[in-house]
Image (cartoon, rainbow, N blue to C red):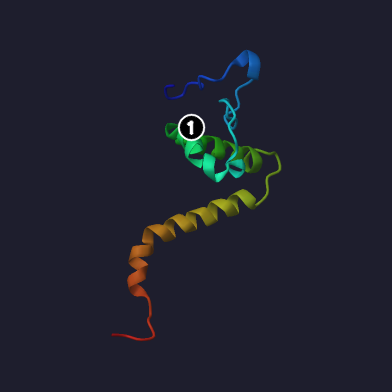
Amino acid sequence: MGFGEYPPEYNAKIHGPYDPARYYGKADIPFGQVKLGELGSWVGRRNMSGIPGAVSRAFWRWNHKYMLPKKTGFAPFAQLMVGCMIVFYSINYGKMVHHRNHKYHW
């Protein structure tokens, strides 16, 4: 599968119009239903090269739910603001940790 191509599991005659928020591969047991004894084999069946596709599907699900409706509210903008705050806090954490005020000094 190259960049910008449909997944190999997608068939237009069966699935209809392509939806980027849908996974067209074979369904597997959800993580919440996996027993501890089956956890190793379940992780072994995971396709780790499909992580960017999973992130893309999650983005498109979020986009369809919050950004693309005709009457969108404040929720997507608040989520983006909080996400940016978390990212920039984690980027600058190393600089801010040195400026803490401690009650007791050495």
* x, y percent for residue 31: 57, 42
* Residue for point 71% across, 43% down: 71
Q: Is residue 19 left or right of residue 101?
A: right
Q: Quadrant of the N terminus?
A: top left
* x, y percent for residue 82: 54, 56
Q: Is residue 62 left or right of residue 69?
A: left
Q: Quadrant of the C terminus?
A: bottom left
Query: Badge 1: few (under 14), some or many (20 or more) residues near its Cα, within 10 Å?
Result: few
List the single residue furthest toward the right.
71
Task: Tell me where residue 13 sits by quadrant.
Answer: top right
Task: Name the one closer to the observer, 88 or 49.
Answer: 49
Residue 16 appears in view? no
Q: Residue 103, relative to residue 59: is it above or below?
A: below
Q: Residue 64, relative to residue 16: is it above or below?
A: below
Residue 81 appears in view? yes
* Residue for point 55% across, 35% down: 57
Q: Residue 36, relative to residue 98: is it above or below?
A: above
* Residue for point 57% across, 26% down: 26
Q: Is residue 76 left or right of residue 85?
A: right
List the single residue furthest toward the top.
13
* x, y percent for residue 91: 38, 57
The kind of residue tagged 1 is Arg
List the single residue furthest toward the left.
106
* Residue for point 57% across, 36% down: 60
List the single residue furthest toward the front.
37
Q: Which residue is mark 1?
A: 45
Task: Tell me where residue 88 sits by quadrant.
Answer: bottom left
Task: Name the one closer to the observer, 32 or 24.
Answer: 32
Task: Name the one closer to the observer, 34 or 86.
Answer: 34
- Mark 1 secondary-structure assignment: helix
* x, y percent for residue 78: 59, 54
